[in-house]
Amino acid sequence: MAEAYGAGQVEAAAVQATAAVQAAALRATGSLNQQAIINWLHKPTTVVQTVTGPVQFNGDGRNLLITKSALIFQWQPGQGGSGAPQFVQVLPNGKPIIPWAG
């Protein structure tokens, strides 16, 4: 069950990251034109901040900053005195989003 929860968390983060990129592209181009959005995303100066980290695409559409947005999870004791273990995301630099309690 925990793995399913973790997979759901990863999927939710991916959806949020995609929405952030789409919103930034719409603001920057002022258009829903796919070619205009593609051109903006592929510019070397375009970097979009998302919930999973920054993204920057090359001309082929590959994320050049993928190593800065890797998702890492770990089991941690429950927060708020519950004691129940939780599967939480930690940042790529190893700093927990929810501080280690044990």
Image (spheres, rainbow, N blue to C red):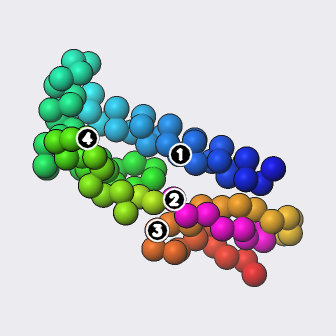
Q: Is residue 47 left or right of residue 84?
A: left
Q: Residue at x 45, y 74 (%)?
A: 93
What secondary structure is found at the residue carrying circle 1? Answer: helix
| Mark 4 → mark 2, Cα distance in angstroms | 20 Å
The kind of residue on which mark 1 rests is Ala
Q: Which residue bears the numbered disc 2?
A: 71
User: How far apart in space, not on screen, are marks 2 and 1 (Cα)?
Assistant: 9 Å
Residue 27 visible in the picture:
no
Q: What are the residue bounds of the magenta stretch?
A: 71-79
SS under mark 3: loop
Is the C-beta separation of discs 3 and 2 under 8 Å?
Answer: no
N-terminal-most mark, 2 or 1: 1
Residue in front for this viewpoint, 44 or 32: 44
First in sequence: mark 3 or mark 2? 2
Residue at 22% over, 28% down? 37
Comparing marks 2 and 1, which lies closer to the viewer? 2
Q: Give the labeled residue for mark 1.
A: 13
Q: Secondary structure at mark 4?
A: loop
In the image, residue 63 lies at what x, y percent?
30, 50
- Residue where numbered disc 4 is placed: 61
Task: Answer whether residue 98 is visible to the viewer in this image.
Answer: yes
